[in-house]
Amino acid sequence: MTALTTQPASRPAPPAAPSVAEQDAERRDGVLAADPVVRSALVRRHRPRTVNHLLTGIAVGLWAAGALLVALVPPTRAFTVHGERPALALASVIAVGLAAVWALAARPGTKAGLQASRWLGAWAPWWITLAVVFALWELATAKTGALTPPYFPPPGQLVTEAWTDRVLLGQSIGNSLALLAVGLFCGGITGLATGLWMGWSKQAGYWLNPIVRYIGPVPTLAWIPIVFIAFPSSFSAAVFLIALTVWFPMTVLTSAGIRSVPRDYFDVCQTLGASNRFLIFKVSLPAALPNIFTGIFMALPTAFVTLTIAETLGVNSGLGWYINWKKGWSAYPAMYAAIAVMVVLCGSLLNLELAIRNRVLAWQKDLTRW
Amino acid sequence: MVNHPNPTPSASDAAETTGAPDPTGASEIADPTGATQPVDAALPAGGAVDVLGVTQAFISKREPLPVLDDVSLSVRPGEFVSLVGPSGSGKSTLLRLIAGLDQPITGEVYADGHLVTGPDPSRGVVFQDPTLLPWLTVEQNVGLGPEVRGVADDPDEIARVDDMIAMVHLDDFRTALPAQLSGGMAQRVSLVRALVNRPRILLFDEPLGKLDALTRTSLQHDIGRLWASQGFTGIMVTHDVEEALMLSDRVIVFSPRPATVVADVPVDLPRPRAEDDPAFRELRRHVLGLLGQ
């Protein structure tokens, strides 16, 4: 074989620049992208929904009408606290606020104007629906008394009650959030670590799998008698319970995620010289992220359940405790106010998780946006 | 637990058997750019590969399945060699052994006279699928080699990554994610990702197998060009005889499974080669004949 001696000479010189065809394609690319006809057609096709003036007008008008309804129609005498002033304030603030955003959207040249326009385009139907619900609620309770007090308080009364009891309610929210944060953190980290370990090491999988499968599915309620005796404080007991419910889905989904990482990723990285450490933390972990986010998504609602149960049965603070306490005093409006706070809190946390997920997993092809 | 990754440790930190037998004696005399006269650091010398009596088998449906039957071959530094054979004949298995991703049942594989005990950055692999890490950009994928070696911040390495991306005309796609690339573009990225480490030996496992005809031709051209400019030793598994003849100094023909070496066909044609050259057509007929077609 003469290959060895002749090689340097026989190797063809690498071409320096892209081919003529490629250059031509690039030029035509530029011309087409700048073509006004192409541009305007694309804008028409892909424009996000902007403000619909009719729908926005109806929304603003309905909320203004709601405010007038509260102010002008005389209330029944069925309630001790009507909360007419907060209801009026609420409806007025919303009406004025929507009108302000509408005014902003009328000047779409600016960035804020465009954002306002898109926001109204997306959410105007919801504001109309809410205005109708508000008016019907107000009519059925404060104005006619068709729904029986005290089980059905008028909307303004919820605000009044929450405001009157703001110190205790605020403390309860703070305590609940602190407990949830500590529990989620401990359970999340432990679950992630257990899942990684189980997914990576056969030995760990052998010993941990039965434990995870038998301890994980046990309902929180069953542990309560033991846990509140075994732990030094009710706070640490509640943290343990929340962490336990978070730990289970996190472990199962993380380890499944690690074990489903394509073998090829490891082959490629190993031929590039990757260490085990790199394969675990820079390959397996990112590849398992879609699963891990599903784990967090499943863990959050069960954490809320456990939080409320723990607060009701052992921890004498927090929203769960507050709701029960108020129910014990038959203070239904305050109880409803606390439930409303809970709805907003849990919903916001879950939405936050999904927003982070959609952002972090943007690299996934055809990512399903939850 | 069967699909547990269980990676083998890197060969570089383990005890390597040195001074291995070299039946051809090739690596002693013929390393024009390497040990004797290190000319240009940016131009790595090609490494030698010696496969000695390798037999490999797997378990399939509880029965042993022999894949390689006493295969021996040598590749000289800087050579480009193609392995052709019927599909499923174990060519890719041999390539994995040379890469160090698997260990043979009997026999030894030597790279530059060192027994191969595990994967090493000096032996790069281009797989059939681009297998880019989908959460990294093109730039980060190409820079994976420096990253795993902990030298990603080295200005030389950064420049090297830039150069390699420019080599395959992907400058405009530096920050693109793999999901946004076409098949040919992704395979180009995986090609230069393997090259960033300046491997002495580059292994190709049917790198163009899943591409359309046009992209395939253009990538064939890229591979030839990179081989010419980077000086590595190339070993390519392919089932496309024409592709093998276009790129290689030698074509090694394998039998159906369990694979043995049927013939070692030198391709003494000047580059660039043309498919309609009578000598080329004659060689293709010869190799296809050896494959029983």
Image (cartoon, coloured by chain):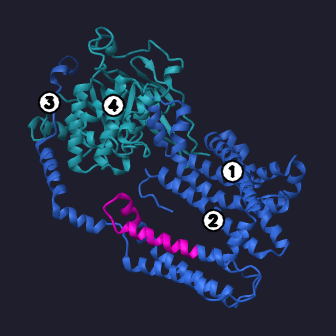
Chain colours: A blue, B cyan
A98 in magenta: yes
Q: In the figure, residue B36 lies in which quadrant?
A: top left
Name the amino acid, label 4: Val
* Mark toward the viewer: 4 or 1: 1
Q: Earlier in the sequence, mark 4 or mark 3?
A: 4
Q: Is the C-beta separation of discs 1 and 3 under 8 Å?
A: no
* Mark toward the viewer: 4 or 2: 2
Cα–Cα gap, marks 4 and 1: 43 Å
On the same chain, marks 1 and 3? The answer is no
Q: Residue at x 33, y 15 (%)?
A: B27
Quickly name the residue at label 3: B271
In the image, farthest residue toward the top = B36
- The numbered disc on residue B161 is 4
Name the amino acid, label 1: Ala
The magenta-colored residue range is A90-116
Q: Badge 1: few (under 14), some or many (20 or more) residues near its Cα, within 10 Å? A: some
Quickly name the residue at label 1: A181
Q: Badge 4: few (under 14), some or many (20 or more) residues near its Cα, within 10 Å? A: many
Secondary structure at badge 4 equals helix
Quickly name the residue at label 2: A344
Position of residue A131 relative to residue B68, above or below, is: below
Q: Which chain carries label 1?
A: A
Q: Where is residue A140 in the image (x, y as percent from the top left)?
A: 66, 88
Name the amino acid, label 2: Val
Q: Mark 4 lies on which chain?
A: B
Cα–Cα gap, marks 4 and 2: 49 Å
Position of residue A88 relative to residue B184, above or below, is: below
